[in-house]
Amino acid sequence: MKYKILLLFLTVNIIFCGCNLKQEKDYQGNINIPENGIVEKSVFSQIQENNAVVTFSGESNCCKYEWTVFGDDIENPRDINLAIEITEEPEQVLLNFQSNDYFGFSSVLSIHLNSVWDCQSAIVYDSENNAVCGASVTGSENTILNYTALQTSGTFCIMPDKADSSQINIIAAEEKEITTENRISTTKNNQQDDYLTPAEQFSGIAVSGENNDNTSNNRIISDGSQTEQDKYLTDPVPEGKPMPVEPENAEINEQTQYTCTFSVECSTILNNLGELNSEKLDVLPADGIIFPATEVIFYEGESVYDVLQRICKENNIHMEASWTPMYNSAYVEGIHNLYEFDCGNLSGWMYRVDGWYPNYGCSRYQLKDGEVVEWRYTCDLGNDVGGGYAVTGGE
């Protein structure tokens, strides 16, 4: 009798626990959008039930486009018109959505252009020329524009960001929930509404010269005279860019505070889901954004790596790095449980500051007040994020 009761208890416990286990995400490949553009409710229901990740692809005027849909974002499946009429013109793309309303879930729209844009970010405008959001610019050969489409009806225009702030996304507080738990405590003035416009984010590039930088205690700007690698195998630093500061020589003064704009994103993975380690689908953000562009405080003398460590710690973002004596810098192996080689043998993390991918490690880049720092995941050794020349940029 006791045996039967124990067996019954174990059976019920297994069933109960099994019902509470979260189903792992599963990438189920690409589905072509029908000629009439309408994907039926049953398709979305199946994606929802299977907790699947699916891309829907279409073509308009020789421009390929894709919607990336996560099953756990779908709440009320229904028929949806995913078709878009696309017109590509020099330095602008016109979008005419065939849907009449919001899909009911957010989805990343990827537009594969037939040209290459000489910029690092783009801006989406509505029919009244109001900036709606930012778009990332990726792609190894032709440009790919990625952005989270919160408005899926009407006409829009995407143009290069002339300010070149390199921001992946402009997120209004009313469009995305922001909580104190996912913001760092050193955010400037502890405000919750400090997401910046491209013009506000861009701080310019340091001028060339040999003098010490007056907003950092030990930083020197390259005059372009260096012709050989230094002892840590760093190629000559371009004129006008900051020379590396060795971590052992950095003097951090916590009495002097500055601010910089910091972000972490992995939107390139959304264009390479077939290459992604299937076990990493559960940690992949649906919009590709791990930490949105936020103005944060740093202390005089701190490096990019110092700030990354603090941001990840205070926001419970996983980060793993190792020290590389040869380059005298930390090497960032993984952020948010997304590691190098997780999306192909040329994938990994890189950083850029004010649009430049430094050719030395992040522990050696001493920050200046007002700079814009971005950590970006590459699937093609930097070629898809505009940093193919900086093969050591992620160190």
Image (tube, rainbow, N blue to C red):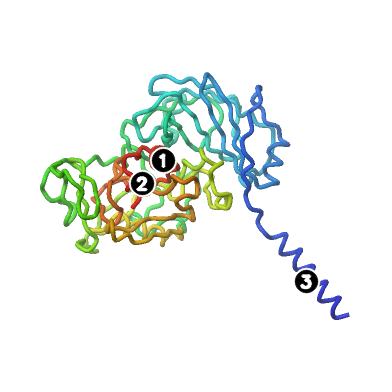
- Residue bearing the label numbered 1: 168
Alpha carbon distance from label 3 to label 1 = 49 Å
Q: Residues within 10 Å of mark 2 (few under 14, many from 20)?
A: many
Residue 196, above or below 31: below
Name which residue type carries label 3. Answer: Leu
Q: Secondary structure at mark 2?
A: strand
Alpha carbon distance from label 1 to label 2 = 9 Å
Closest to the observer, 148 or 136: 136
Name which residue type carries label 2. Answer: Glu
**Can residue 45 be seen in the rendering of this structure?**
yes
Q: Residue at x 29, y 41 (%)?
A: 356
Q: Residues within 10 Å of mark 1 (few under 14, many from 20)?
A: many
- Residue bearing the label numbered 2: 374
Earlier-in-chain disc, 1 versus 2: 1
Q: Is residue 251 left or right of residue 81?
A: left
- Residue bearing the label numbered 3: 10
